[in-house]
Amino acid sequence: MINKKKKTVVLSSLCALLLLTGCTSAEQKNYQEGESLLQQGQFEEAAGKFQQLGSYEDASLLLMYSRASEAAENGDYEAARSAFASLGSFRDAQAMLRYYDAREQEAAGRSALAAEDYGAAVRSMTGAAEIYSELPDVRDAALREADCLNAVYERGRSLLGSAQYSTAGDMFTALGSYQDSSELFSYCKACLLEADGAYLKAADLFSGIPSTLDASARADQNRDRIYQQALDLSAQGDPESAINLFGALGSYRDAAAQRNQATRQLVQDRLKRGDYEGALFQLDAAPDAMPLQAVDRSVPQRFAGFLDGFVDAYLHFSAGSMDSVSGYYGVLPYIEQGGALDKRFYQVLMIGSYSHNSYYIYYGSELLDVYLLDGDCYIAYIRASASVNQPVGPVEVTRTFRILVRDTAGGMYAETIDDCLYGQDQPPARPVITGPLPNNELPADEDGDGIIIVDVMKKGFNGTMIIVLDPSRVFVGGPGFYGGSGMILEDLARRYDALGGINGGGFIDEDGGGSGGLPEGLTIVDGQSYHWAGSGASAAFDTNNVLHVGYYSIESAAEAGIRDCVSFGPALIVDGSGEYGPYMESGINPRTAIGQREDGAVLMLCIDGRQIHSIGANFGDIRDVMLDFGAVNACSLDGGSSTVMYYNGEYLNSPSSASGTSRYLPNAFLIKK
């Protein structure tokens, strides 16, 4: 039998156990209800449940979590952040800190939208959206991200509809790739260009987004405006401006035919005025506008003797192999005295040729073709051969010329002469740049090789610019040792298996007959530094491929991390500021310069000089060309008959020596393949 006392103890223990189990079940139920309320966003009720639980499990932390959420929902973000921060790593407290940061930014953004403070609104709303995007699984963050972006987007559409293009464009820019924001930004930009009268740029932008709103129709409307402007200019006697506009329209309507018609009229007008160079320049810009007419077989025979004598006299004059005055009078029988070509010869006579050739032997010529241009004007192509002196001895050369000749009752007269590539494969036509680049944008890299080549034309001189988009491809090359002879540019290019380049720094050149064996100033090539004699400013690339223009010693160049350097000067542009002063306007000569844009692209410039087609430029001229191309640093290199540009197997400029090729150089800026 069970003892009565023991029975009483057992019953008491059982009751206590049942009571404890009942309490535990009630606390667990409240805890679960609190969790459910918390998940439903009923933070006040959840806080009440957790408060009743006291120290049960983590109820005290959940109480703080619930009250922090409640404070945030009531707009007290400061209290909420303080509470969440104190929770440390408990559950997702840190994520909630970020979430309510976004909620606060969103609230500020919506208030700014209502107040039409669009700058603040966009910053706050897009900032909130960015935070929400980082918290895709936190509460309603994904929905709020979309709501923030959509609120900005819809307001942007509304502003666009009321023609507030600038503000709308700012909104679409901030939205990035959201829906069609990038296209709407372009649309707004095009509308602003249209409002400013920049119809062609507007048309190009509208054409790029043809399915956006009425962009396609507006593109045509803007082209119609340009087309009508061109017609009006042509009717008003300004065919040159009309030609530029028709050319910009490309294949739109009959713009090409209209351009050709205006070009023909302009060429004929210039021929009548005696502006033969201008006529050929315009014809070269639109070669299909005025097709050349084949002539009778007897015509080349009548031209051959005249042209042979003229080219012989011209080359002797250019080479300086006789005294300059005698050379000038040797040319006079072939040109109209007092005419444009006569004035050009006289200008070159006054400047001097300085070609560094002690003799020149003319071997003869071959007349290739003659075409009738218009009236009594003909275009002839003639190839001449000669031997010229270089520092290492005579070099045989062959050059081909294009000459505009008038065949009149009073005799034949040469009106223009220029070098050409007739008889060889013609290179693709290069863009012709006559002033500052529109919007500082480089011409297109059509073949995608990272190299852009353009022709530069200014009053009094012509030149060529090689633009290297990747500055790490530009380096200094040399002959391998100093003390002997330098190398011509094409041999330097072959030595380094380079695409080509331009001449570099100065060198000791006694009596103009130097062999390029000793550079002047600081030279850094192939990792070696040299310094002979004094010189002007240096053009130097550092290891980050940034061009510096200044004065360096071997020690200061090493400290600055300079990898390649040549010296000549003067500095043209330093840290975005052009150099000015009396010395910048002195000296009309062939010029070479190197520069760099803010985007890193390297500008390699050669200006022809001491020649009939291009008299030359002073330092201020090449500074201005570099500024036209957006250079932030630029330096003049060795010029005169050293000026030379070689690329992909051919000389792109017309060096002032009769050889038409390079002098022997101590170094050059070259371009890696």
Image (cartoon, rainbow, N blue to C red):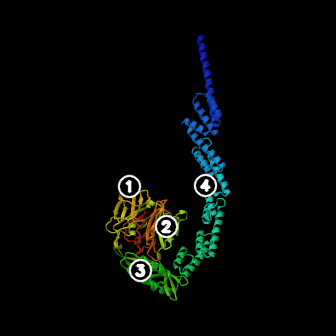
* Quarter that holds the C terminus: bottom left
Name the amino acid, label 1.
Answer: Glu
Across and down, in percent, residue 423 comes to 47, 77
Nearest to N terminus: mark 1 or mark 4? 4
Nearest to N terminus: mark 4 or mark 2? 4
* Quarter that holds the N terminus: top right
Res. 324 visible in picture: yes
Left or right? Give the position of 396 relative to 154. left
Name the amino acid, label 4.
Answer: Asp
Q: Which mark is residue 317?
A: 3
Name the amino acid, label 3.
Answer: Phe
Q: Residues within 10 Å of mark 2 (few under 14, many from 20)?
A: some
* Rendered image quadrant of residue 218: bottom right
Question: Which residue is the site of mark 1?
Answer: 559
Instruction: Please tell me whether mark 3 sits on a helix, a strand or a loop.
Output: helix
Name the amino acid, label 2.
Answer: Asp
Mark 3 to mark 2: distance in Å?
31 Å
Question: Which residue is the site of mark 4?
Answer: 170
Camera-near label (2 vs 1) is 2
Q: Which mark is residue 156?
A: none
| Callout 3 touching callout 2 (CB < 8 Å) | no
Question: Which residue is the site of mark 2?
Answer: 624
